[in-house]
Image: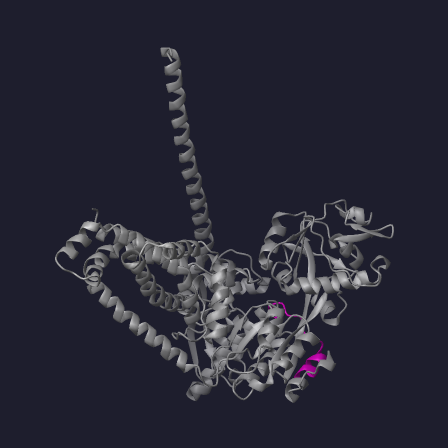
């Protein structure tokens, strides 16, 4: 069994080479992932930033007789085609509600048509040569310019790209997530407490545990089918509502919360439980006053991550009807609503090219919210976590 | 502990709010519910938005479920939870209308709103191609007749089909089998020409080849358009409105010598064109007061007429006489019968 010095040192060199290679390969993998991330962000930022600016034009509105029937008649014919229809279609109603407007004029900044917007941003547009000249002249006079796009944050979806916004989807997301949290959090935590603190370790609980782990890995669309069959068809929950969407996503989030809570409970050392029992606490008191509060940071982190996952989900929501066209902002749990990723999905399918930047802009907003959520999960953990 | 308590009160509030919310919808609706075709969706959602913005009623809810899926939901019955209108990029089938009647949906009005062409287009960098329906069929069918026998499609280059066509590889991006566009393509561009070909024995043949020449490109027509600009060798099959939005990137092939242009499609000269419809559940007219206000807005001249708003976004208007017929049917609340189909 004797090896010469040379053999041993050659073997050593080989082993060192191998570990160096492993290091480079794993660094390469990280670099590649980072590169993709940078490319993705650069692409999204490049495409999405223009969405936060929108062209406006200053026009003179003449509330005349004709404008009572056709809003367009209130505008100078030269610019009337350059102004968003979302503005001019409201004029007849305004005159109907405020008859004293009739015969007056007003100068105001209003949303420009999306083609003007695309032209000013240097994208492909459909303006004719004479319309281009008009826009150029307006820019020269300071009567047309790109301004910060408040519409994007204050309105719902629209067929007219210049007037479409993410507010209705954002409100829908908040409502849906409230329902998801209200259902998944208590049920998830209680299930985990029972399984971890009370349940005997037998065949049945083992089967339950395997099933929970399995559920966490099921394709999300199946939860949508379940939601359709049970919540909508059987319980009659209104279709497309944040209520049914939230319930469906709660099913999807439950296993994540249960698993996270169990891990958090398990990391609370038994000495805490023993000490509490030692001074005469009941099982209920031990869990409520000692184990659960100590496990809370871990439970919160898990729940936030589960929620962030649910927030980015579209597939199950297509099945329960939440991928819909929702221009109105509604704060009801039972009325039709949509969510941010579904809004992005809807915009991505629009033929009009001006929606490309809206799509990317929507993605940026969604990303910002997800980064905020995940960062707060990390901060919560760092702040409250106790190491034993 | 404190934290748990806090979150508990918070949750009770949320659940209570949710219950109140549900109780609120248990009466007659002000909000119209629409389902159906993804082809009609852009037009219908334009009208719903206009309706929401200019009337006192809330914006109707519209879901893009595909024609078949929409009619299935529509025919599930009468009452609160069922849709009031179903959009369709094809006519309702007799079997579907029978199922409707079985479920109590006995009074349905058919509204024809316009036409749509299915285009066969490529990157505009290529030379234009003029195809006959038969050539198009031979390029996409799974089995084609060679010397009178049906064999697996052997054509890989356009010039194999007809020597007058360019020597270019056949590569086609098209809609998947769940799509209404695919249904219409199979019916108009496959069934029709194959019925006249002896080898199929007078029966329509609609099997699309699966040897990688025809590529399912997903429901999103934008993706097909994007791929065509990158893969200049390939053709795509999609709706006319996407051609309108990309006039300089795409060039559509003429079929049987007719280019897919609004007039040709409207007149029925372009062979792969279909009519667009929606179906109204008249039994809901009383419980859903805005129902016919919406229908009237949809069929107004300002929407579906020549130069109407929907034309701007790609709808091909019906000839004037047909628009009048549509309006008459709506005014009469004409009830569609199985015998009409």
Residue B235 on the magenta segment: no
Q: Is residue A105 left or right of residue A190?
A: right
Query: Which stretch appears magenta?
Result: B312-327
Report the coloring of the rendering.
Answer: one colour
Residue B323 is a magenta residue: yes
Residue nearest the observer in this picture, B194 or A47: B194
Residue A35 image position (x, y, % from top left): 44, 41
Q: Along the horizontal axis of the image, is B64 left or right of B212?
A: left
Q: Quadrant of residue A380?
A: bottom left
Depth order, front residue of B170/A135 = B170
| Above-or-below relation of B155 to A308 | above
Q: Residue at x 26, y 50 (%)?
A: A267
- State whether residue B300 appears in this view: no
Residue A384's place in the image compared with A112, above or below, is above
**Quadrant housing the N terminus of chain B:** bottom left
Q: Is residue B56 left or right of residue B260?
A: left
Q: Position of residue A218 (x, y in %)?
A: 47, 56
In-front residue for pair A203/B81: A203
Expressed as whole percent of the image width and height from the top left, the position of residue B29 reads 48, 83
């Amino acid at each position: 069994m004797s090896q010469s010095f040379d053999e041993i040192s050659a073997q050593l060199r080989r082993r060192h080479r191998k570990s160096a290679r492993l290091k480079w390969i794993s660094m390469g993998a990280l670099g590649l992932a980072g590169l993709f991330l940078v490319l993705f962000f650069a692409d999204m930022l490049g495409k999405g930033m223009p969405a936060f600016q929108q062209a406006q034009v200053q026009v003179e509105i003449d509330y005349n007789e004709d404008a009572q029937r056709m809003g367009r008649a209130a505008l100078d014919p030269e610019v009337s085609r350059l102004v968003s229809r979302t503005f001019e279609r409201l004029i007849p109603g305004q005159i109907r509600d405020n008859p004293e407007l009739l015969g007056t004029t007003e100068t105001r900044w209003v949303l420009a048509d999306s083609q003007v917007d695309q032209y000013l941003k240097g994208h492909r547009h459909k303006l004719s040569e004479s319309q281009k000249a008009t826009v150029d002249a307006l820019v020269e006079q300071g009567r047309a310019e790109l301004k910060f796009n408040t519409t994007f944050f204050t309105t719902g979806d629209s067929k007219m790209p210049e007037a479409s916004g993410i507010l209705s989807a954002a409100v829908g997301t908040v409502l849906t997530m409230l329902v998801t949290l209200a259902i998944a959090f208590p049920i998830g935590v209680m299930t985990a407490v029972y399984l971890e603190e009370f349940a005997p370790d037998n065949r049945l609980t083992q089967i339950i545990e395997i099933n929970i782990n399995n559920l966490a890995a099921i394709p999300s669309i199946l939860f949508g089918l379940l939601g359709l069959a049970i919540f909508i068809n059987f319980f009659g929950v209104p279709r497309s509502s944040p209520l049914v969407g939230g319930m469906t996503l709660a099913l999807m989030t439950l296993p994540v919360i249960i698993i996270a809570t169990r891990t958090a409970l398990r990391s609370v050392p038994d000495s805490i439980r023993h000490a509490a029992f030692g001074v005469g606490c009941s099982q209920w008191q031990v869990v409520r006053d000692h184990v659960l509060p100590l496990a809370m940071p871990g439970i919160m982190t898990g729940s936030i991550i589960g929620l962030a996952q649910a927030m980015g989900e579209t597939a199950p929501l297509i099945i329960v009807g939440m991928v819909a066209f929702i221009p109105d902002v509604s704060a009801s749990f039972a009325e039709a609503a949509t969510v941010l990723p579904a809004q992005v999905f809807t915009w991505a399918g629009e033929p009009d090219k001006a929606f490309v930047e809206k799509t990317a802009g929507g993605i940026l907003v969604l990303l910002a919210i997800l980064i905020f959520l995940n960062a707060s999960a990390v901060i919560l953990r760092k702040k409250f976590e106790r190491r034993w | 502990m404190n934290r748990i308590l806090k979150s508990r009160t918070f949750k009770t509030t949320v659940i209570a709010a949710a219950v109140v919310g549900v109780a609120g919808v248990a009466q007659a609706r002000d909000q119209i519910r629409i389902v159906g075709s993804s082809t009609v969706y852009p037009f219908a959602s334009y009208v719903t938005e206009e309706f929401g913005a200019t009337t006192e009623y809330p914006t109707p809810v519209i879901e893009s479920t595909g024609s078949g899926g929409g009619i299935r939901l529509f025919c599930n019955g009468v009452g609160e939870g069922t849709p009031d209108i179903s959009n369709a990029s094809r006519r309702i089938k007799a079997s579907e209308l029978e199922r409707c009647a079985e479920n109590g949906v006995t009074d349905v009005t058919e509204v024809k709103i316009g036409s749509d062409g299915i285009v066969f287009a490529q990157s505009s960098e290529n030379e234009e191609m003029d195809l006959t329906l038969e050539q198009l069929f031979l390029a996409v069918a799974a089995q084609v007749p060679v010397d009178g026998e049906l064999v697996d499609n052997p054509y890989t280059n356009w010039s194999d089909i007809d020597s007058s066509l360019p020597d270019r590889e056949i590569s086609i991006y098209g809609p998947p089998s769940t799509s209404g566009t695919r249904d219409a393509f199979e019916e108009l561009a496959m069934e029709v020409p194959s019925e006249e070909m002896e080898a199929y024995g007078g029966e329509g043949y609609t099997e699309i080849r699966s040897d990688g020449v025809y590529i399912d490109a997903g429901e999103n027509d934008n993706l097909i358009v994007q791929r065509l600009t990158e893969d200049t060798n390939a053709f795509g099959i999609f709706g006319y409105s996407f051609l309108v939005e990309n006039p300089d990137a795409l060039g559509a092939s003429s079929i049987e010598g007719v280019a897919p242009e609004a007039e040709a499609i409207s007149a029925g000269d372009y062979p792969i064109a279909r009519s667009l419809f929606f179906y109204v559940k008249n039994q809901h007219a009383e419980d859903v007061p805005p129902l016919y206000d919406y229908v009237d807005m949809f069929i107004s001249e300002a929407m579906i007429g020549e130069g109407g708003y929907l034309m701007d976004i790609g709808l091909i208007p019906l000839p004037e006489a047909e628009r009048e017929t549509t309006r008459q049917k709506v005014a009469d609340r004409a009830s569609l019968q199985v015998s009409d189909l």
